[in-house]
Every structure is written in C-alpha cells, then in structure tokens.
Amino acid sequence: MSSSLDSGPDAGLGSGSSSGWFTEVFDSHGSAFSLKVTEKLHEVQSPYQHLEVYATETYGNLMVLDGCVMLSDRDNFLYHEMIAHPALFTHAAPRRVVIIGGGDCGTLREVLRHPGVEKVTQIDIDEEVTLAAERFFPALTASNDDPRAELMFADGVQWIEEAGDESVDVLIIDSTDPVGPAEGLFKTDFLRRCHRVLRPGGVLVQQSESPLYHSGTIIRELRRDMREAGFDSVATLPFPQPVYPSGWWSVTLAGKALDVTAFRETDVTAHELPLDYYTVEAHRGALALPPFMRRLLEE
Amino acid sequence: MSSSLDSGPDAGLGSGSSSGWFTEVFDSHGSAFSLKVTEKLHEVQSPYQHLEVYATETYGNLMVLDGCVMLSDRDNFLYHEMIAHPALFTHAAPRRVVIIGGGDCGTLREVLRHPGVEKVTQIDIDEEVTLAAERFFPALTASNDDPRAELMFADGVQWIEEAGDESVDVLIIDSTDPVGPAEGLFKTDFLRRCHRVLRPGGVLVQQSESPLYHSGTIIRELRRDMREAGFDSVATLPFPQPVYPSGWWSVTLAGKALDVTAFRETDVTAHELPLDYYTVEAHRGALALPPFMRRLLEE
C-alpha cells in the first residue's frame, strides 16, 4: 500500500482515456472507491442510462451505469449469491420466480441453480445491459439458454401491474439505486402490487444499499414500506461487497404469510451448489443484525 | 452518487493542503479508497512512522500511519470489537491480557469491558500514536485510567522475548500491516515465543488483512506459521471494515491446548456490553468461512 496525496487514482484517467483509474464518488457520504483500469472496452448511451465496461487491473471486467459501479468479475459473487439464495431457501418450495432488473443475468444464473424452480422471468428495462453482459461477463449469462429462463426487456413496474394475482413464489428486485430508472421500484404502491402478485408463502427480496450509510434512512424506510404494503415479516441481510459504497451492502426480504427470519437450514446444509460465499452460517449470521443496525432500524 | 473521471477525489488535496480528499492507494490490488477531508488536524514524524490525523466530512476523525488508514471515528468499532471479543469469549476465563501494538487504545477499551480481566498490558513501540489518540480519539482512550490497564511504549517483540513462560491468557497482536515497524510480528519465531508466553488454554489473536485480497497469501501463511509455532487450532474471522482495503478485513485466532473454533456462546448471549457489531451470531457466522476462503486457505 502507498498513500497518494499529490496525484491520485484519477490523475491518469481523462474522460475517454483507456488507461488510469475509474473512480466512483459517493458525494453524500464523503467517500470514493477507485479501481485501476487498463482499457475502456465498451460505452453506450441507451434510452435509459449511460453504460460503460472497463477492463481493470485486478477486478476483471467492470460494468458502470450512469457512473455507478454495478459489478466486477472479481466480487459479483457476493451480491448475486446473497440476493438469490437467502430468498429461495426461505420460500418453502419456490417454482415460479420473477426478477425485476438484473439485466446482467448473474441473479438469474443463481436462481436457476435451484432444481425445483420451473420458470424464471427476468424483466429489465434496458437490453443494453444484457447485451454488454453477454459480451463482457459471459460467465453470468451462461444459463440464459436454460429452457426455464425467460428474458424480457420491458418496464418492470408495468409488468408487475399487469401480472396475475398470486402467480409468483419469489420476486427479486435486482435494481440500481433508488434514483433514475429504478426510482419507481422503491415506492409503496409498487410494493403493494408485488404483495398482490405473490402467492401466500411468497418472498420478495430487494437490494437495500449500505448498512453503514443507509440503515437509518433507505433501509429503515423500505422495511416500513414493506410492512405498510401488507408483508407480514421483513429481514435485512448485510454482506460484504467491496465495489459498492462502504464495501458493505444488504438485501431486504419480505414475506407474504411467511416468516422470513427462518429458512430451510437443512436444505442449505445439504445442497451441493458451487457457491463461493453463501452458507447456512452466513445466512444465520446475516439474519442477526449488528446492534448498531438494530437501533437504527427500530420503527 | 456521481462518477468522477476528469477530476477525482485527489484533485483538491495537495500535500499539506487542509481541504479536499485523503486517498489511500492499494497498489498491489489496483484499488483505492478516499475520504473527503475538511482539515489536517495533526502531523508528526515519529522515530518509527509518519502519523497524520484528518477531520473528515462524514467519518469523523481519521488516523493515518505511513499513508495507510488506521482508523476512523465512524467505523473503528468493527475492528476493535472483532479483535477483542472473539478472543476473550473463546478463552475460558481470561484474567491476564497483553496487547502488542494497539496504541490507539481502542482494543484496550474493549478488553477492559470484561469484568474478569485483572490486568491488561499494552505495548506499542510508538508513543505518538497514543498521544494522538488521546487528543483526537478521546472515546478510545477513555479507559486508559482503569487501574487494570498498563501502557508501555517499547518494542513488543522484545517484550515477548523477555516475558515469563505461561504468564498470559490472551495475547492480542493489534499491529499495522506486515511491513515497516510491524514486520517482526508476522514471523514464525515471534509466534513461537507467543506460544511459550501463553498459558495452556491461551488464545493468540492477530489482525490478518483482507479476505478478498489476502486469503491465498498472508492469511494462509499466518495460519501455517501459527500451526508450526505449536498452536493446536486456528480460526480466521472475517468482518466488514469500510476504511480498510477491499472494505473487508479479518482476525486470526490461534489456541494453545484450546479449540478456537468454539467459544462461550452462553456468556456472549448473556453479556450486557454496549457493543455495536459483535454478537453470538456474528461470531458463529464469522467462524464459518465462505467457501472461496476455505478453498484458498487449504493447506
């Protein structure tokens, strides 16, 4: 390690440059994270957002949407395992799964590892994300040809509005931050519709930002909104995620006529999925929130 | 959040400037972490290292040694709780505790929360660290007047060399990285002496770098060295630490005639210590390593 006061990670990277550093500044939290990049591999302005892919020196490929890091080859396993497996092992027997967002297809891949799942529909508004994932993150899209997988490029909010009552077992909101195209996914009306679409015993899971930065704000509000939308139980699970603000992230589960603070522990212990992070102990440990979070989340 | 390509966190902080960003670059890992600083509060070149204290916009005060972030007001609770409590709750009844390093006194404070502890000696080579902590991190040094606390400013390696056989219950190596003044603390000879100094049933705990960056290197070697030094069991516990490289850190415990993969769970559940992170579930969850770490640590 070495410090850098006079010249920083950004010094070498002019806009459009192909070498230097990529930096994401978290303005409201006074912190920033940088990765050394060797090349900009891809850049496209979709109707919804600005998408870039960089080759980094040590994190593999890096996808960036509107300047925010979405995922890297090196550490996306943490997020994708934690948004998929806790929810699927909390539901008693998930067969029908819907993913809103998730265009990089990493969550889809994890869901399809569950042999009991009969159909997964992924609805991302922006096809450019999936096209970029196919080219630059082929490991994540490796399951896209699974006959159980259905990929749609459409407005997830509208899809949920039109979906049949009690038609889904697990609903995964794998979105960007609650600004820009994903804003509608963090509203009570949307959560009410999610509740309607879920079968009894169903699970909703949503990425829910940083335990350090957002426990007293976004996470607390999301949990309150989930309860107001009719869900009977909520559980926030923190996990490490180096490329996201503070290096610490979370998902929040909500149960419809189901307690999401319990899960199929025996099945988790017995599974032979090729996972890198998720275990029965990781799930249990995450369910028991750190005391500082418990205090901030108190409603 | 916003991205920054043309001008980065460092742009505003010239050496000696009092406003802008402080950035730590992790060269060998191609990443960097930055905090917005409002003022440099303190700077001193000790005989051992270069010490700086900054006021940050959102992390409180920040201590930096030789350009590496040591701790911030905002998130030091994670490190200090995890280097102290797992070790103390693993030992059956710790009375005599020794801290090598730890000059900021945050670990000392956590150790003194255990009423059964009769004496804690902290041996840091650099008194400037403690002087800076007293001025700029008074919460951490709040227990320094406890009659059970002894602060020494001396060479920890030599102190261990001269310490009596089987005279210590818990030995905490709260050091900087294994380069510079702390290099001698990561060597097998030193670990052998630690083993000699510990009573049977004793616990050694050492900070052991990033699970993401160092599982296959520093952590793996430390665990092997601990076993070679005579310890009967080892356990590496990961935990989040936003200001450290990758935002994910670890401590490694080693037991002398003791299994460090078990701990006094009932006592942890019963305690009423004012903690922010450590719980019985956090300890259990940390003990069960993520599969990717298990594979990298396999000896």
Image (cartoon, coloured by chain):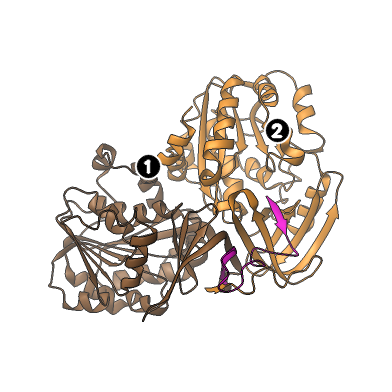
Chain colours: A brown, B orange
Q: Horizontally, is A240 left or right of A224 in the view?
A: right
Vertical comparison of A198 with B255: above or below: below
Q: Residue furthest bottom?
A: A47
Q: Horizontally, is B151 left or right of A243 in the view?
A: right
Q: Which secondary structure dominates the residues rendered in magenta?
A: loop
The residue that label 1 is drawn on is A281
Please report the bounds of the magenta region as a residue range. A1-26
Q: Residues within 10 Å of mark 2 (few under 14, many from 20)?
A: many
In the depicted view, which residue is nearer to us: A205 or A154?
A154
Q: Is residue A14 visible?
A: yes
Q: Is residue A260 visible?
A: no
- Residues beneath discs 2 and 1 located on the same chain: no
Residue A129 coordinates in the image, percent (x, y): 35, 68
> In the image, is residue A24 part of the stretch drawn in magenta?
yes
Residue drawn at point x = 61 percent, y = 47 percent: B80
Amino acid type at image mark 1 = Glu
Q: How many marks?
A: 2
The residue that label 2 is drawn on is B185
**Chain ID at mark 1:** A
Residue B18 occupies quadrant: bottom right
The residues tagged by marks 2 and 1 sit, at their Cα atoms, a distance apart of 31 Å
- Looking at the rendered structure, the secondary structure element under dot 1 is helix
Vertical comparison of A17 with B147: above or below: below
Q: Residues within 10 Å of mark 1 (few under 14, many from 20)?
A: many
Residue A276 coordinates in the image, percent (x, y): 38, 44
Q: Quadrant of the C terminus of chain A?
A: bottom left
Residue B230 occupies quadrant: top right
**Chain ID at mark 2:** B
